[in-house]
Image (cartoon, rainbow, N blue to C red):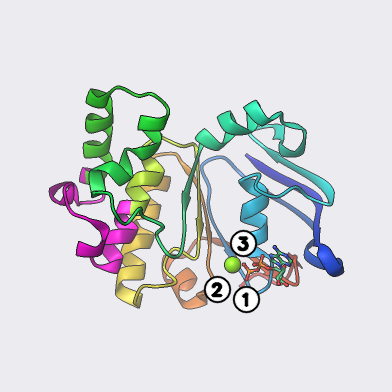
Amino acid sequence: MIDADRLSKVYARGVYAIRDLSLKIDKGEFVFLTGPSGAGKTTFLRLLLREELQTEGRLMVHGRELASMSSGEVQTYRRSLGFVFQDFKLIPGKRVFENVSFVPRVLGVTVEQQRRRAFQVLKWVGLQHRMSAYPHELSGGEQQRIAIARALVNEPSLVLADEPTGNLDPDLSLEIMNLFREINARGTTVVVATHDRELIRRVGRRAIALAHGSLTEAV
Ligand SMILES: Nc1ncnc2c1ncn2[C@@H]1O[C@H](COP(=O)(O)OP(=O)(O)O)[C@@H](O)[C@H]1O
Ligand SMILES: [Mg+2]
């Protein structure tokens, strides 16, 4: 599913955010990406989102090399991904339902289908009764569940999350991880970046550890 081969990303001033990184993540896996702040976790996810291009090496997803995609192909590719951020990134002035169905609406999905899909994913994260709430009326844990529902609404084959529990307490963090485990149990590949080793230990899945942009000892 994901195949990085001697991948490097150098930002301006010669900073290697990713350095000579080779790794494989299989379809259907649930993998943590860990390491201290500055290790390159976010950069690797941004390369996977194709928001950045590598400086050296190769990155393949679904058998396609990301760097050689046309802009049209990049759009199609991104629709096969779901993304969850640390700070939820819900649109403040829009109700939960509108937040969740924003992408389907832009893609021209019918209103009827938008409703059906939004209800489905909201029910799945246990928040179908909050469809009409605004983000500021929800707790942090609830906002992150809404953000996860939004990431799932397009039925992505790959879900990427960058420190999704960074703003949540340990119990809520585990609850969010259980959602990712369920997403994964339904066949979706899941990659979660977190510096929280205790959480990784509690969830018990493969962890890819980075330091200074390279693989380091497993945690
Ligand atoms: N846009 C950027 N421009 C220059 N340097 C960057 C940029 N983004 C990240 N970096 C640098 O790349 C390294 C890896 O950062 P990052 O991928 O954000 O790590 P992590 O997510 O593990 O904390 C750090 O040294 C960081 O300062
Ligand atoms: Mg980061």
Which amino acid is tagged 2? His
Is the distance from the Cβ of mark 2 to the nearest ligand 1 atom less than 8 Å?
yes
Is the distance from the Cβ of mark 3 to the nearest ligand 1 atom less than 8 Å?
yes
Which amino acid is tagged 3? Thr
**Which of marks 2 and 1 precedes in the sequence?**
1
Specify few, some or many for label 2: CA neighbours under 10 Å numbering under 14, 14-19, or 20 or more: many
Magenta stretch contains residue 55:
no
Quarter of the figure that contains the N terminus:
top right
- Circle number at residue 176: none
> Which residue is under mark 3?
42
Q: Position of 180 compared to 72: left or right?
A: left
Which amino acid is tagged 1? Ser
CA–CA distance between discs 3 and 1?
Answer: 9 Å
**Which of marks 2 and 3 precedes in the sequence?**
3
Q: Residue at x 31, y 46 (%)?
A: 99
The part of the chain drawn in magenta is: 123-146
> Which residue is under mark 2?
195
Q: Is residue 94 above or below residue 85?
A: above
- Circle number at residue 37: 1
Say which element carries label 2: loop
Q: Residue at x 30, y 70 (%)?
A: 172
Q: Is residue 21 above or below residue 1?
A: below
Say which element carries label 3: helix
Q: Do the residues under discs 1 and 2 have CB atoms within 8 angstroms? A: yes
Is the distance from the Cβ of mark 1 to the nearest ligand 1 atom less than 8 Å?
yes
Q: Quadrant of ligand 1?
A: bottom right
Task: Estimate the x, y position of residue 149 in percent, counting from the top left.
Answer: 33, 47
Specify few, some or many for label 3: CA neighbours under 10 Å numbering under 14, 14-19, or 20 or more: some
Mark 3 or 2, which is nearer the eye?
Answer: 3
Q: Is residue 67 above or below residue 165?
A: above
Q: Do the residues under discs 3 and 1 have CB atoms within 8 angstroms? A: no
